[in-house]
Amino acid sequence: PVEVARPHAGHRPRPPAAPAAPTRSMARLRAERDRVHAAATAGGDARGQRAQGKLTARERLDLLLDDGSFLEVQPLRRSVVGNLKTPGPGPHTDGVVAGSGTVDGRRVFVYAQDFTILGGSLGAAHAAKIHRVMDLALATGSPIIGLNDSGGARIQEGVPALDGYGGIFRRQVAASGIVPQISVVLGPCAGGAAYSPALADFTFMVRDTARMYLTGPDVVRAVTGERVGHEELGGADVHGTQSGVATFVHDDEESCLDDVRYLLSLLPANNLERPPAAAPTGAGAQQRPRLAEIVPPEPNRPYDMRAVLAELVDDEDYLEVHQGWAANIVCALGRIDGEVVGVVGNQPMVLAGVLDAAAAQKAARFVRFCDSFGIPLLTLVDVPGFLPGTEQEHGGVIRHGAKLLYAYCEATVPRVQVIVRKAYGGAYIVMDSRSIGADLSLAWPTNEIAVMGADAAVDVLFGKELAAAPDPRAAREARLADYTTELLHPYYAPERGLVDDVIDPVWTRAAVAGALAMLRDKRGHAPQRKHGNVPL
Ligand code: HXC
């Protein structure tokens, strides 16, 4: 610390000769300020919220942020002109509590819509406050978290309300890949408002109270005649299992906000920071004997890839994203030897681990997120191929599969592939093969990597020959044995340099830790272009 310099005594201001007669009372002004603030921040009548089992905006912020860390901006802001419904100025805060605080000591910016004031609807002042915290988040390189509980665009304000939403969306896109964006839906989030969670990196929803749809049940009935309830149309489970809009689904707000904190603990504050490392755990020297027991050596016997994941990460702790959607692929954030890593793994327990349109979309978005924020990727491969059939083809599995391919090809973070068992055809390539840029490919001795499995291959290659054989069955068995011996043995790919090594399964955690340490200082070079044309 430097010694504080003092002005020369002669320059110090002299006390006035006689105190000026008080014209205004500081005590009164302070008391008045306190009164205005207290009224402004009191919120509206919370009985409706309570009846629905919902917390208030400020209670939510208390749960999310470190104690006493919240610094509110513009609590006094209001709509200063009247409108169709409110003749004079509107209520203070304009239905949103905005500002900044810390989570585990790390800076975040946040806004919480207050349903007790004008239904949390978004008017021009409300939107301007959100714009303000988003601008500050971007300027300081800090995550932005939105707690949504709103009737949507404030109808009585007209087009300025829509303009306000547009400003949020534009800022979200500008901040994408620069600061993490988390959207938490804790009440209604209807109409275009739903695009804010859709643009965020992660979206949390709470069962029974959160709902998201472009048009509510009444409009659905009026337009299509279909009768559907709120929960069934846009509840947390619908978005967590079918649409893929919700990344995380929770039973209550407390556990939801707790997991927002956990997620933040795994993310860097911005794209220029390294992900937050914890203390090293000595993973590089640790054997995991259970790995050899979890995975059956027969290629088609199912097991839970999450059990493998738990053995690989520190303390068996990880945060799975989109747990209920496209469960045939597992995407999770965790740590290995203290360093944050994003893990993508086929899930043999669901649909035998095939890739389909939904799985490809889920993994592609996750890979792109990790790459944006410098989170290394670990890909655990055990995949029989893409799911065949008209439903998939007509649903655009080619387009969606291309997203995953694109995401991996573009990723410049450290990339480690572990081929646990089978890896066939296009699915082998897509699951971060060396050919699309994995930095290190390791395989277990159970690996089987080929264009296709033995049965299908023998049919294509020797169909005519087998049909003409005196004993087609015996001929087929012989050809199957040939194919398996020649092409499906675990050293076929390593001998050709397409796999860097065959490792002992029990040492996988150590091998991955070593690989990530080796690749820690990898630098990626983005090509000079405006942007690529990712297949959307
Ligand atoms: C103005 C609104 C409002 C809105 C609710 N309120 N939504 N005020 N604009 N959009 C007010 C209500 O008038 C009411 O005021 C108070 O908030 C509480 O609302 P309730 O209806 O009493 O609450 P509840 O029964 O819980 O129903 C909540 C609700 C319902 C399901 C959200 O209010 C509703 O359907 N609102 C309209 C939703 C909607 O269509 N929004 C526009 C979406 S389009 P009082 O004074 O009675 O207490 C959109 C475009 C965005 O958002 C475009 C971006 C590109």
Image (cartoon, rainbow, N blue to C red):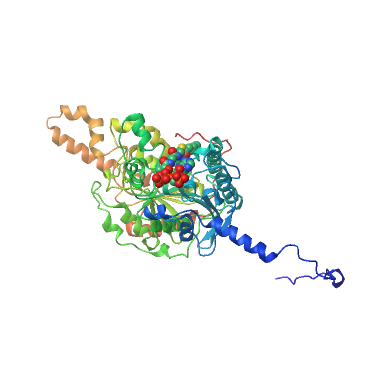
Q: Name the side, left or right, on which 301 lies relative to 206.
A: left
Closer to the camera in the image, 330 or 417 = 330
Res 433 seen here: no
Q: How many marks?
A: 0
Closer to the camera in the image, 13 or 319 = 13
**In the image, residue 383 above or below residue 142:** above
Image coordinates for residue 180, horizontal then vertical, percent: 51, 50
Q: Answer with the quarter of the image where residue 31 lies.
A: bottom right
Image coordinates for residue 94, horizontal then vertical, percent: 54, 48
Q: Name the side, left or right, on which 287 lies relative to 107.
A: left
**In the image, residue 444 above or below residue 214:** below
Quadrant placement of the N terminus? bottom right
Q: Residue at coordinates 27% horizontally, 48% vertically from top-left?
A: 349
Image coordinates for residue 149, horizontal then vertical, percent: 45, 48
Q: Residue at coordinates 28% horizontally, 41% vertically from top-left?
A: 486
Work out which residue is located at the far right of the displayed protein and give it: 10
Work out which residue is located at the far left of the displayed protein and give it: 470
Image coordinates for residue 6, horizontal then vertical, percent: 79, 71
Q: Residue at coordinates 46% horizontally, 60% vertically from top-left?
A: 63
Res 1 seen here: yes
The image quadrant in which ligand 1 is located? top left
